[in-house]
Image (cartoon, rainbow, N blue to C red):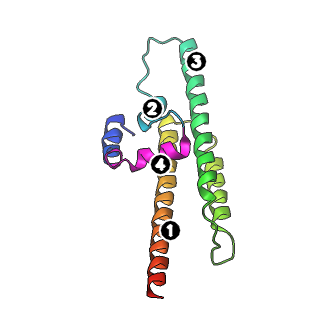
């Protein structure tokens, strides 16, 4: 089971470096932080004193929030894939491969009901987007350095 405290403590390293927060903010441009995401999606044990109407309202709000987060993540993935314009060994652009895989992942998780699993998927997706962008930026820096060193030799 996903424990909020242990999850938050494991993210402190990412927050200390600022990389996770920065990329999520840059791509998302929304008001959400990881803490807000966790607060919104991880369900604490329900208070048995709530009546059915309150439970239904909370469930609808959570579903609406989850849909917004999933849609936001999907849009961020589509935006991020614009930068992957080189072909693979078969000649298919990586942009198209990444988009197809993202679509498949979202379709596979479409009917997931467990809020903890949904939260894991959303956070894992955000981390994957961040990681892919970090790697792309690093490769571009290396390529620029290589080109500059080649220019200096000539």
From the image, tell me which residue sits under label 2. 36
Foreground mark, 4 or 1? 1
Q: Mark 4 falls on what kind of element?
A: helix
Residue annotated with mark 1: 140
**Is residue 82 rendered to the left or right of residue 26?**
right
Q: Which residue is mark 4?
A: 23
- What crowding class fits label 1: few (fewer than 14 Cα within 10 Å), some (14-19), or many (20 or more)? few
Q: Position of residue 113 (x, y in %)?
A: 57, 36
Going from N to C along the chain, the mark reached first, 4 or 2, is 4
As rendered, which of 65 and 153 lies closer to the eye? 153
Give the Cα separation between the discs numbered 4 and 2.
16 Å
Disc 4 + disc 3, Cβ < 8 Å: no
Q: Earlier in the sequence, mark 4 or mark 3?
A: 4
Give the alpha-carbon distance from disc 4 to disc 1, as whole Å.
Answer: 17 Å
Nearest to the eye among marks 1 and 2: give it: 1
Instruction: Return the residue at label 3.
Output: 57
- Residue drawn 43% across the image and 15% down it: 48
Asked if residue 35 lies left or right of residue 133, the reply is: left
Q: Nearer the viewer, residue 44 or 80?
A: 80
As for residue 26 lying within the magenta part, the answer is: yes
- C-alpha span from label 1 to label 2: 33 Å
What's the distance in space between the residues labelled 4 and 3, CA to CA?
A: 32 Å
């Amino acid at each position: 089971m996903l424990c909020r405290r242990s999850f938050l403590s494991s993210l402190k390293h990412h927050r200390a470096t600022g990389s996770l927060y920065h990329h999520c903010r840059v791509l998302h441009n929304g008001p959400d932080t990881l803490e807000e995401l966790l607060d919104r999606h991880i369900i604490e044990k329900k208070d048995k004193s709530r009546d059915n109407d309150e439970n239904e309202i909370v469930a609808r709000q959570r579903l609406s929030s989850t849909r917004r987060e999933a849609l936001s993540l999907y849009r961020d993935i589509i935006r991020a894939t614009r930068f992957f314009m080189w072909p693979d060994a078969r000649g298919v652009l990586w942009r198209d491969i990444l988009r197809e895989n993202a679509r498949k992942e979202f379709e596979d998780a479409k009917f997931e009901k467990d809020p903890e699993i949904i939260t894991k998927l959303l956070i894992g997706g955000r981390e994957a987007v961040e990681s892919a962008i970090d790697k792309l930026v690093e490769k571009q820096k290396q390529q620029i350095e290589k080109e500059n060193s080649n220019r200096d030799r000539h």
